Amino acid sequence: MAPGASGVFRTMCPMNCHPTLCGMKVEVEDGRLVGVKGDPDNPDSRGFLCIRGRASREIIDNPERLLHPLVRAGRGDTSWRETTWDEALDLIARRMRAAGPRAVGTWSGHGLGANNYGTRISSHLLRRFANLYGCQWWTGTMICWGLGAYGLGLTGALETSTKEDMSAHSAFIILWGANLASQPNTARHIVAARKRGARVITIDIRETEASSQSDETFVIRPGTDAALALAMMHVIIGEHLYDVDFVARHTEGFDELAQHVKAHSPAWAAPITGIAAERIVELARRYATTPPAMIVVGGSSMYKGANGWQGGRAIGCLPALIGSLGVAGGGFGPRHGASTHGQTLNHSLLANDRRPPGDDIPNQMSRITEAMLERRLRVMLLFGTNMVSSFADTEQVTAGLARQDLVVSYDLFFNDTARRHADVVLPATSWLEELGCKSTNTHLYLMPKILDAPGETKPVTFVLRELARRLGITDFWPWETDAGPVDAILDHPSTGHATVADLVAEGGMRALNISHVAYPDRKFDTPSGKIDLYSARAASLGFPALPVHDDLPASTFPLTLRYGRTLTHFHGFYDHGRALPTLAKADPEPELWIAPADAEARGIADGAAIRIHNERGDMTARALVTSKIPAGTVWMRDGWGGMNRLSSGTAVMPDAAVDVFGFSGGQAAFDAKVEVSARSSLDYS
Ligand code: SF4
């Protein structure tokens, strides 16, 4: 756009509520942002823009915005001085050279995907840089949806059907740990399905906003999803409700599974899950006899636990038993991070084949923390992430970052990690100030550069190109313009070989060449192409071949802390939302859901100041006493600073197993058993 131009421009919200995402119209006058609103012509969001999307307007012209490169006066000092990009990049390149490539780590968060989620343009460029230089790069899936998808992958059911398929065809929908705050645009399709007569069930550890869209809610104990699924299989197989033909043609190991689940009756599962045996029986019967039945599994929160992958593994078997995979309205519905059948992109720019030999630190959260503590990592380049907020076991991460020769934070605003650990802070452009392109499960959306970049803010392409030049990586950037890598990534039949120029000509959006129904060919994601009810691959990786439930690790702390999403935050974005006045006002402080019985036993009143603590650390919050959560479980929205001082950073699976599916299952356990006590005042320091 020409400087000083005016008009209304089409883009997308800068947050990443994949797989749905929201279209945005941006009004500009004389080169200045006037307002943002939902895009009624966006086929995914149809004009919807939630409070977070509307609040994104406050990123622009925000007085807290980072506008110049900054260098800390000295370690332990809280003062900063402005510097030039040249001085900052020279310093970073010097420290990188001194450490050596393999001692340099690059870690990016959702912030790096603000205008390219679903296409991963920035992440792919960072990975290309890491491959050509030989430094560390890790997949961000280990902090998010990777562990749940890992369990589904062992079973062989990674593809998802679309929300449009759900609203048109599903007769029975289970929202299993799926919080609609994570994918609000799915809600419209659930409502449409219900209008057609579909029955909707929510399974969660608390009554969520999805409960209000549901006919029935099953409140389950945290980490017991696999037990519930095993008991449902017990009923479906024991009562001969399974699809004999589908099982015979498309699954492996039915006999072993049938034998295995005999011991997993609803009576066995009831005390584990907290759900009465007769309700489990009824749920299983209705799921098996109301075709087509779809399960929408949660993207991340339900897998935060030492047994996290087991839920996905066991739930993955259910649609195979009832023969709903590859059926319109059946199988699995939209899931964060998942792809539809046919949805992929061109990954050749990654240059994986050009990575120099050396020791790679695995895609395993715990190993990254260890490597920082042991100084096998000496320089950390952080892009769009608040690492001390998002990584498990914050105190260990903090200690690891303190041992680095150099920590660099590239972001829009200061965050906890930058304040406490960065030596250099680099100011990032926002989603309106650089070229991008997002993808949902069904569409591509161009995100053009609409505003001039303020101050000295720069896109990540500038940072990587300049570092590559200083480090002698001569062919990091073989393109003429910023459209070059976008075109390279989109060059795939799935997009119709779309280019930026095509998308401009087409009004900024294009439908993907995908199937709305997952697995139309019944070729599943296992070595045999069948659904692995019994998984020899799992056994070869050191896991049980059949789906299992393991109890969470024992603890002397009585309450199980779980996390999730709300409509008023997006993880730790924008300094935990504090930088955007609308979000800061809507969600002013950490609030812990606690059951009336648990609160009364501790002398805690609704709204009281509380201390949440365990063997790892503590945090301050306000109590929300509510009967929407059962005794024994407490819940807080994720992304609050200090919350992960409570969570376990222990590895869940062997290093050799994490990369089997091309994304990482190397999430730390994140378990947190806690105690809660009243405190005299709210002191968040
Ligand atoms: S739901 Fe997510 S993508 Fe949509 S407007 Fe809200 S924050 Fe943005």
Image (spheres, helix red, strand yellow):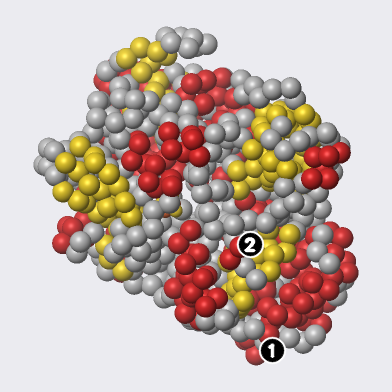
**Gap in Å between the C-alphas at discs 2 and 1?**
33 Å
- Image quarter of residue 225: bottom right
Say what amino acid the circle numbered 2 marks: Ser
Query: In the picture, which quadrant includes the N terminus?
Result: top left
Q: Which residue is drawn at 36% across and 18% down?
A: 70
Image x and y of residue 341, in percent: 44, 71
Q: Which residue lies furthest to the bottom in this view?
A: 245
Q: What element carries label 2?
A: helix
Answer with mark 2 or mark 1, whichever residue precedes in sequence.
2
Alpha-carbon neighbours of circle 2 within 10 Å: few (<14), some, or many (≥20)? many
Taking 545 as reference, is 656 above or below it? Answer: above
Alpha-carbon neighbours of circle 1 within 10 Å: few (<14), some, or many (≥20)? few
633 relative position to 18: left or right:
right
- The label shown at residue 354 is none
Image x and y of residue 592, in percent: 68, 39
Image x and y of residue 333, in percent: 53, 69
The residue at which mark 1 appears reads as: 244
> In terms of depth relative to the viewer, which is nearer, 448 or 594?
594
Residue 501 in sight here: yes
Taking 411 as reference, is 313 above or below it? Answer: below
Say what amino acid the circle numbered 1 marks: Val
Query: In the picture, which quadrant includes the C terminus?
Result: top right
The residue at which mark 2 appears reads as: 211
